[in-house]
Image (tube, rainbow, N blue to C red):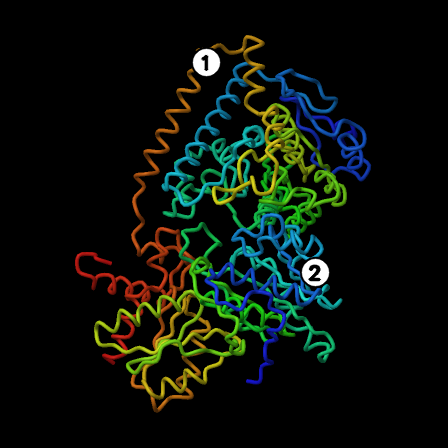
Amino acid sequence: MSSPERWTQPQPSGAPAATAARPTAEQVIAGLRATSEGGPELVQLLTPEGERVDHPDFHIDITPEELRGLYRDMVLVRRADREANALQRQGQLGLWVPLLGQEAAQIGAGRALRPTDMAFPSYREHGVAWCRGIHPKDIVGMFRGVDHGAWDPVETRFHPYTIVIGNQCLNAAGYAMGQRFDGKVGDDNGEATMVFFGDGATSQGDVHEAFVWASVYDAPLVFFCQNNQWAISEPTERQSRLPLYQRARGYGFPGIRVDGNDVLATLAVARWAMDECRHGNGPVLIEAFTYRMDSHTTSDDASRYRLSTELEEWKLKDPIERVKVHLSRNGFADHDFFDAVQAEADELAAVLREHCVNLPEPPPGRMFDNVYAESSATLEAQRDEYENYLAGFAGGEH
Amino acid sequence: MAAPTMDRSTDKQSAAPQTITMIKGLNQALRTEMERDPKVIVMGEDVGKLGGVFRVTDGLQKDFGEQRVLDTPLSESGIIGTAIGLAIRGYRPICEIQFDGFIFPGFDQIVSQLAKLHYRTQGRIKLPIVVRVPFGGGIGAVEHHSESPESYFAHTAGLKVVACSNPVDAYWMLRQAIECDDPVLFFEPKRRYHEKAELDLSVAPQPLFTSRVLRKGSTATIATYGPMVRTSMDAATAGTEDGLDLEVIDLRSLSPLDLGPVYESVRRTGRLIVVSEAPSEASITGEIAAKVQQECFYSLEAPVLRVTGFDTPYPPAKLEENFLPDLDRVLAAVDRSLAW
């Protein structure tokens, strides 16, 4: 049986497998105190100025090479995001949902996942998708209107984007219950699931129900809430009277608020939370405190409801800049490295653009595909009738 | 149907006819009703400071305050559920569901409580709630932003369901819905939001739960509603080149259905095409076909035909022009009916 300290402390990497047992009520309370009442509210390991700082509960040992990798991840996903945003402005996409400002939250969380883990995104998780090996070109199709998502969710263990707010949390709870029922939870090799949602989603019944289900079934599920401060035009105060991470207490599991613009802290907390789940101590709620630096989508205009001074303040906490400063100041990277990453990012953007503008139009008959595992005679008759109708237009004038 | 005459004495707009968009018509209806009755409130996601993602509620929070225009938490079940409580307390809430596909988290409250409380309490509780739903496709949107869920609600006893098709109806029908003591699901064809028409407040509106013959004709009858009214009218216009003289009826009310004008029309033309964006199976269009064959059996020269969205989930945007009925598909159905 683990001690309260064990339960609140991050597991040192490579340590032997800990207990698979569910924590006691005292341990649960201890876990909460570690982050809410007992310690600094916001877990941070790298300040906006690029200084490494210690946290009593969360540590990370990271090599310069790994740091450079995280930097590269963030630069690349930001570049792809900006390219997609530009593609929308140029009429090549119907819509884009920018991740700008949330790179650290998403890369920190995404790099805490193992290939055997599962992730359920909302619709802004292009950075997590990147970590699951999904190229941005497989994301833009749904925003160009040629498909509903091109990646294989089984192979990548990255569920399709979910647009109806909060729905995916219950789906993730069920998946995580299955991981436990299958005996995949209990040691360092265990599986776990991470579900992504936003501050606005925390008001949805599905999210609260997922908190209940995940907790009473001890599901290995990390609830990863990116609190980007805005649900379209509504500030977080419209969703909650108390910090979102404190919601977890009422459901009986720990909640931690991490600096979501700090990729190191996010990675450390996410790894700890996933390890807790692997060992059977889930679920865990992580509130990644971050900022939506762009509008909700390209259809939105944030200047209608928020002050530009707020954005200026958050720019000082940019998730990428602090890593760059840290790498430079400590001699972990030189100009050649930064130039190479930028060149790679531009190449990625070019590939994305080339792919996007050349995406083939889907054939009309495709809309009848995959409605059912076994299609019905009535649906197939409808398909035949429509294809015959189209064939009646000589020369494809229709 | 004995509908109360709309009180137009409170209209502050000038008597001169004005050109409005559908969005403007809806906005003006909300404003007029809020001025008329302090118990009328608006609630929904982003309806306050932003004025709604389509700007239908633009300026209302600024003028009526945060207690009458509520930027709610993101919870459709919460929006409908608390609106019910507010209505019991004497308010007349107008709920905005941001997009058609987001209504389903509120489905339980709509079907289990909103539709049934009047019945369960022998009429002691009235729920004068309007649920506004921008619906239908044609705007190139991602999933869940282009659906036509009206049949679910028409299938539920206790709810009234209407769909406007033009800016003038949008104005009057929304006002009438707000003044109605029954819960009304109010469907707004979002692809028609920016179309314009002249609103003349001196012309009295027809009762809310009635259909309207928009175009008289003799060849065949088209019954439709919402976004497909424009499509059907365009088809009728195009059909004149082929010698077709099509009658077009805007159903306006989907529950209750006002099919009297449809029966009268079909008895003259002998042919009916029902047009809707929604998939056809177990839908309002099927209900209309069943009722018309029952009432007009000996007048029909051909079976009632339907032109609808297909029985698939709404496809990716690049395929929506295939999914949605268009002028050609409507005229092809007319041809089939005539060739029967």
Looking at the rendered image, the quarter that the C terminus of chain B falls into is bottom left
The reply, left or right, for residue B246 in relation to residue B113 is left
Q: Residue farthest to the top?
A: A331
Under mark 1, the amino acid is Phe
**Which quadrant of the view contains residue A316?**
top right
Between residues A68 and B167, which one lies in front from this camera angle?
Answer: B167
* Circle 2 residue: B82
Residue receiving disc 1: A337
Q: Left or right: A308 with respect to A79? A: right
Amino acid type at circle 2 is: Thr
Vertical relation: B216 (above or below) A159: below
Q: Circle 1 sits in a helix, a strand or a loop, which is it?
A: helix
Q: Is residue B195 above or below residue A62?
A: below
The image shows residue A105, relative to residue B293, as above or below, that is above
Q: CA distance from mark 2 to mark 1?
A: 56 Å
Of helix, strand and loop, which one carries label 2? Answer: helix
Given this view, does label 2 or label 1 mark the residue nearer the observer?
A: 2
Same chain, labels 2 and 1: no
Q: Chain of mark 1?
A: A
**Quadrant hosting residue A257:** top right
Decide if residue B79 is on the left or right side of residue B154: right
Q: Which mark is residue A269?
A: none
User: Residue A97 placed where, x, y %?
Assistant: 49, 40
Dot 2: chain letter? B
